């Protein structure tokens, strides 16, 4: 059996209905477990104090903000090349999740920055890149919403996702270039993995797994909704024609 | 292909406002900024490169929705899509026409507006060079946005939302070139990157734009 | 049970609060829209007399 | 010029929903075919599919390359350009030379310098037809070509189409009013209306490409 079998909406609905409870359960366990471990049972960092606890949400959400876009890019490519509807709808379903993750990364970054940098917002290259990524999500979602015909919307958003990916990478590079002088020192950054001791690292890994599973759960739920919505539209159109 | 460019230029001239509107907008932005930040020359000189680049970028944005809208409404776009020239060439010529009617006037006028903002020393030279290198990218990227939104009724606002994030790298490298030039620093790196973005956009984006037009005409 | 968050208590708690609020909103919205579409689809299928989807 | 067009078992869609299926016909050089059918049956969509503006769902379209000159509801004329400027633009796009004989054939010589925006509806249609002539393409595809024309203009239109047919060209026209071309064959599209009951049910096969995959 080929993997493309799952691109058939019916097959996808069957498989995802079976998988959804398992993925949901795992996501809840990993997320709740990881966050409780991180929040209650880890020591404070000698430099950052208790703010180090923010990494358990900031780092996974930042990773998922980028991973969600990558997943959308892959799904868009599959739609463009193989024209599987489920793929296009999965990309559509993932966008608001990615956007929320970007927002979480931005908020937690800003909240963490307040005591560290003395200001809510610094044009730190990382934060700035996420702000730009947020704008890309906004445009992508707005384009989906603006187009009535679902296949046209899928085509155009896929093209936007492709072009947007290139420009998002360019922006990342440009922002680094633009803000060389103000770059935060690694010791005061939350994202420097080499600074994360084991005692922080293990709960962080669990949290990352939790966010990944949460993403998968939500993508499955939302893709199922999109498929049902498409089917509803198709049935309504058929009723009108008959 | 040249015929298409000439036709678009002629249409822009006949319609009036083609050249003027973006330029007037640019002027107004330049005039409004001192009212907002105060007349102090040192402050203005410091922010002039950024303001001039942002102003030029917004002026460019203003006329983007007209690139395909008129041709879409009167059926010309259908006819062009069935004509023997490739759609990629059509969108390239459309972008070229947009640059000639919007980008080029901005390049020419920017140094004059720089005087209003107390732009210093070599800034005038680098402003002109960076705009000359960067505005073609703005037109080509904008054409891509216009191609995505061509069939939509309320595409104008969406167009801005789609295009502005794509403008970020161009803006950063463009304004950085002028800033460094004004301060007498090395401008080679940002200028090369700006030229790179323009070259890559001109070479690759027409394929995406043409694909978007094809989808929209379906 | 509550760990001592020291002088950064407000910072840490607000970060977790914002995150949980955003995640909850996302999950609830997804579930709500999913249920609504499912109901509408089932109604449509019943009306058309073919529930074999 | 070769104006042979064969359409076999064509299925087309509009907005993701199949509208016509099983459409087959042949258009010979020197012949005209009129597509008829109630509003919304898919006449325009069929013409756009044949012109290559959208892909068919199924079936084959066989014709020589670069054979079609398409003319939609709108003429694609620029109101602020003169008659000559409009025509010379399309002549340049299609890489055809002089358009003086076309001006004459379409009775537009006296209007050469006028802006297209100042022409009457009939004159505009004639200019639109002149564009088709300028394209030098053998197969014309016309969507509602005589809408808003008076009797004299319709006669002139019929004359232009006959001249094109006599020269070995072919014409495919979608309309719901009389075109004044009695010798044209008529194809009623109503019987080809896509039946939802036969199109749906299975998600495989050609269903993969359209909304029915979800039904």
Image (spheres, rainbow, N blue to C red):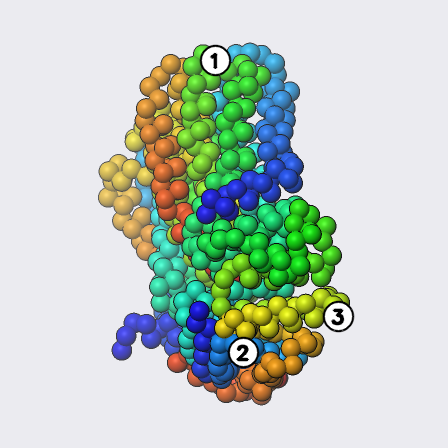
Image vertical order of residue A205 relative to residue D193, above or below:
above
Mark 3 and mark 1 residues within 8 Å of each other at the beta carbon: no
In this rendered view, identify the residue nearer to me: A172 or A29: A172
Residue lying at 61% horizontally and 25% vertically, measured from the top left: B27
Q: Measuring 42% from the left and 41% from the top, which residue is drawn there?
A: A130
What residue did someone put label 2 on?
D31
Image position of A66 with respect to B21: above or below: below
Q: CA distance from mark 3 to mark 2?
A: 23 Å
Residue denoted by label 3: D151
The answer to whether the residue labelled 2 contacts the one labelled 1, judged by CB atoms less than 8 Å apart, is no
Same-subunit check for callouts 2 and 1:
no
Q: Horizontally, is C4 left or right of C51 in the view? A: left
- Is disc 1 surrounded by few (<14), some (14 to 19) or many (20+) residues within 10 Å? some
Disc 2, SS: loop
* SS for callout 1: loop
* Count of residue discs: 3
Identify the residue position indicated by label 1 in the image.
Answer: B120
Q: Secondary structure at mark 3?
A: helix
Marks 2 and 1, how far apart at CA: 73 Å
């Amino acid at each position: 059996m080929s993997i493309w079998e799952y691109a058939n909406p019916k097959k996808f609905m069957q498989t995802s209905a079976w998988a959804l409870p398992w993925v949901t359960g795992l996501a809840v366990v990993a997320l709740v477990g990881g966050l409780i471990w991180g929040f209650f049972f880890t020591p404070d960092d000698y430099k950052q104090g208790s703010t180090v606890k923010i990494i358990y949400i900031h780092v996974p959400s930042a990773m998922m903000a980028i991973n969600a876009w990558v997943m959308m890019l892959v799904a868009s490519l599959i739609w463009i090349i193989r024209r599987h509807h489920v793929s296009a709808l999965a990309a559509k379903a993932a966008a608001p999740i990615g956007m929320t993750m970007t927002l979480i990364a931005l908020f937690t970054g800003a909240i963490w920055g307040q005591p560290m940098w003395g200001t809510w917002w610094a044009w730190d290259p990382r934060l700035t890149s996420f702000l730009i990524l947020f704008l890309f999500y906004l445009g992508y979602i707005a384009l989906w919403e603006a187009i009535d015909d679902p296949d046209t919307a899928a085509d155009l958003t896929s093209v936007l996702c492709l072009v947007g990916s290139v420009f998002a990478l360019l922006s990342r590079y440009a922002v680094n270039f633009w803000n060389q002088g103000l770059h935060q020192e690694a010791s005061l950054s939350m994202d420097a993995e080499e600074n994360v001791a084991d005692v922080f690292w293990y709960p962080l890994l669990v949290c990352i797994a939790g966010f990944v599973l949460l993403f998968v759960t939500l993508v499955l739920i939302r893709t199922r909704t999109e498929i049902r919505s498409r089917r509803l539209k198709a049935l309504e159109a058929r009723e009108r024609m008959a | 292909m040249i015929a298409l460019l000439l036709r678009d230029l002629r249409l822009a001239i006949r319609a009036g406002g083609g050249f003027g509107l973006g330029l007037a907008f640019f002027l107004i932005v330049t005039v409004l900024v001192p009212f907002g930040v105060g007349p102090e020359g040192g402050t203005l000189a410091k922010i002039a490169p950024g303001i001039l680049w942002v102003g030029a970028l917004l002026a460019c944005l203003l006329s983007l929705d007209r690139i395909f809208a008129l041709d879409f409404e009167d059926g010309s776009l259908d006819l062009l899509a069935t004509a023997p020239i490739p759609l990629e060439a059509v969108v390239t010529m459309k972008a070229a026409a947009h640059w000639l009617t919007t980008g080029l006037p901005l390049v020419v006028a920017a140094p004059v507006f720089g005087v209003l903002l107390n732009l210093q020393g070599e800034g005038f030279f680098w402003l002109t060079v960076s705009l000359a290198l960067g505005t073609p990218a703005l037109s080509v990227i904008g054409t891509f946005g216009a191609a995505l939104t061509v069939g939509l009724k309320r595409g104008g606002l969406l167009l801005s939302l789609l295009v502005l994030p794509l403008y970020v790298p161009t803006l950063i490298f463009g304004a950085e070139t002028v800033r460094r030039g004004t301060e007498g620093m090395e401008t080679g790196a940002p200028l090369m990157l700006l030229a790179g973005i323009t070259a890559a956009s001109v070479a690759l984006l027409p394929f995406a734009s043409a694909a978007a037009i094809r989808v929209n005409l379906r | 049970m509550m760990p001592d968050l020291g002088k950064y208590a407000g910072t840490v708690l607000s970060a977790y609060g914002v995150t949980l609020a955003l995640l909850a909103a996302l999950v609830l919205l997804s579930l709500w829209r999913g249920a609504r579409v499912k109901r509408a689809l089932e109604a449509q299928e019943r009306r058309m007399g073919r529930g074999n989807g | 010029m070769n104006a042979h067009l064969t359409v076999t078992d064509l299925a087309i869609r509009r907005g993701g929903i199949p509208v016509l299926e099983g459409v087959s016909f042949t258009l010979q050089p020197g012949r005209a075919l009129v597509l008829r059918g109630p509003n919304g049956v898919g006449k325009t969509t069929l013409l756009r599919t044949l012109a290559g503006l959208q892909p068919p769902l199924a079936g084959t379209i066989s014709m020589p390359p670069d054979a079609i000159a398409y003319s939609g509801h709108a003429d694609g004329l620029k109101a602020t350009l003169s008659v000559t400027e409009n025509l010379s633009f399309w002549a340049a796009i299609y890489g055809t030379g002089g358009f003086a004989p076309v001006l004459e054939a379409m009775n537009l010589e006296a209007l050469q310098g006028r802006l297209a925006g100042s022409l009457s509806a009939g004159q505009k249609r004639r200019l639109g037809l002149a564009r088709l002539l300028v394209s030098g393409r053998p197969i014309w595809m016309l969507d509602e070509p005589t809408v808003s024309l008076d009797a004299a203009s319709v006669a002139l239109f019929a004359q232009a189409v006959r001249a094109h047919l006599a020269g070995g060209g072919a014409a495919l026209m979608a309309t719901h009013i009389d075109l004044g071309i009695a010798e044209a064959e008529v194809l009623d599209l109503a019987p080809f209306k896509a039946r939802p009951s036969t199109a749906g049910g299975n998600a495989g096969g050609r269903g993969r490409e359209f909304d029915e995959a979800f039904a």
